[in-house]
Amino acid sequence: RLLGFQISRQANVGGDLCHSLYIEV
């Protein structure tokens, strides 16, 4: 979960989408 959050923040591309996906996974 932490990894996903960091990756999402770094990518900054559709963070909401990535965040949701990471949280779900």
Image (spheres, rainbow, N blue to C red):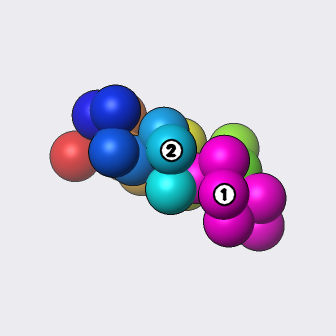
Residue 14 visible in the snapshot: no
- Mark 1 highlights which residue? 10
Residue type at the position of mark 2: Gln
Q: Secondary structure at mark 1?
A: helix
- Mark 2 highlights which residue? 6
In this rendering, the answer to whether 11 lies above or below 23 is: below
Q: Where residue 24 appears, x then y in whole percent? A: 30, 39
Q: Where residue 21 appears, x then y in whole percent? A: 42, 50
Cα separation between marks 2 and 1: 6 Å
Q: Quadrant of residue 12?
A: bottom right
Residues at circles 2 and 1 in contact by the CB criterion of under 8 Å:
yes
Q: Is residue 4 magenta?
A: no
- Camera-nearest residue between 7 and 22: 7
- Camera-nearest residue between 4 and 16: 4
Q: Where residue 5 appears, x then y in whole percent? A: 48, 39
Q: Is residue 17 left or right of residue 19?
A: right
Which quadrant is the N terminus positioned in? top left
Q: Determine which of the numbered discs, if any, sits on residue 18 in the image.
A: none
Magenta span covers which residues?
8-13
Image point 33% across, 45% down: which residue?
A: 3
